[in-house]
Amino acid sequence: MAKTLIILFFATLFLSVPVAFTMGIAGLSAIFINGGLNPLVATQRMFAGIDSFPLMAVPFFILASELMTACGLTNALLRFANALVGHVRGGLGHVNILVSMLFAGISGSALADAAGPSAIVMRMMREAGYEKNYAGALSAATATIGPIIPPSILAVIFAISTNGVTVAGLFLAGIVPGVLLGVSLAIANHFVSTRNGYRGREHRASASELRSATFSAVPALIMPGIILGGILFGVFTPTEAGAVASAYALFLGFILRAFTARTLYAAFVRAAVVTSSVFLIVAMASIFAWLLTYLQIPQELAKLITEITDSRLGILFILAAFALICGFFIDTLPALIILTPILGPIAYSAGIDPLQFGMMLVLNLTIGMITPPVGPVLFVIATVGQLKIEALSKAVLPLLLAELIVLLLVILVPGVSTFVPNFFGFAN
């Protein structure tokens, strides 16, 4: 049955069947072929996969992101970032990175970043003389910060897929790695800009210009503070934080008179479509993940790994390499749901902190979003920027190296992921 499941999964995947249906077809076919399982178990696992209170945070955060974008606050963040770092060498590249870090505190999604602020800055970079493939590559790389800095949709999915990890704890675990991603990309951008002569704006922003840009960006900058502050001080749960963020974005849009009936309707429709796709993937992946557990794949994999090494660090490196390879071929969300119940027990039995493992897994799969052949962020940027995927994949390599260095730090130094949650009392 295990062979049937794996063969059907990869066969449908290579036929370019959407990944949600790939997992559903493989799972249901394996159940019917086996004959020893009641087919109703599929519907039970689908319902159990989405019947989760923490999962309700996902549609709220998606809606909040859409409403904030509809408010036009992306331009305010761009103006603020340009006033802050636009004057340094490779200024627009640094603006791209900073905007992605700020937008991550609103959207929690790499694809939303790639299609929104990253795409806007990419066009600005090309107009300023940056090589088009490098502008696209940097925009793709910066978009991967979105799922790391809280609020993160992937953090919510991981937390509901494993025991002993809270959404709040994983949110906090992403702060330091997210900042390190931004710093590593800024260093890489500095070296590339020095080599190619990419300069910043001619003059540093004046004090009045900086004050004006900051004031216009304050409404957007407040949202991450509302989310994290409310969670840290026990005012509301992460799920309730999503609802509060949506209400704040809706209130802000009316105060700024940024909404029309058309834009408001479009924002709700986009949020509904994205939410539906997420829940469909979660439901289908739940069947697939349950079957892997039922077939004792985690136990077999654990036995294989412990035969290779019993070192905690060695096991963590093997798990990281396995997750990274999976990220090359499987989309991030289904890969996370499938791998968490498989790799999690192996990591926990080796004494690896669940927060460190969770952040390592999320970061691994996020890096996979900018690597071919799947690389959804690369394809979004290539489509928006009318770039060839081959040239874009080559241009992203030095930036990919910078992100892999951060991944190495997460693996080698547990405190990178655990310090902030420990400090605020959200340790496991």
Image (cartoon, rainbow, N blue to C red):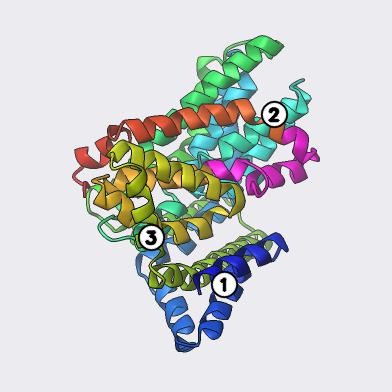
Judged from this view, the residue extending furthest toward the front is: 307
For image coordinates 47% across by 27% down, the residue present is: 405
Q: Position of residue 276 (x, y in %)?
A: 57, 69
Number of other residues with Cα within 10 Å of mark 3, as a class: few under 14, some 14 to 19, many 20 or more: few
User: What amino acid does circle 2 point to?
Assistant: Ala
Mark seen at residue 395: 2
Q: Which residue is mark 1?
A: 4
Q: Position of residue 212 (x, y in %)?
A: 53, 27
* C-alpha span from label 1 to label 3: 17 Å
User: Which is nearer the eye, 248 or 17?
Assistant: 17
| Tally of numbered discs | 3
> Residues in magenta?
367-392
| 358 lies above or below 214 | below
Q: Quadrant of residue 67?
A: bottom right
Q: Which residue is mark 3?
A: 300
| 75 lies above or below 383 | above
Q: Is residue 269 visible?
A: yes
Would residue 380 be counted in the magenta stretch? yes
Q: Earlier in the sequence, mark 1 or mark 3?
A: 1
Q: Position of residue 1 (x, y in %)?
A: 51, 75
Q: Quadrant of residue 5?
A: bottom right
SS of the residue under disc 2? helix
For image coordinates 32% across by 53% down, the residue present is: 346
Q: Is residue 84 visible?
A: no
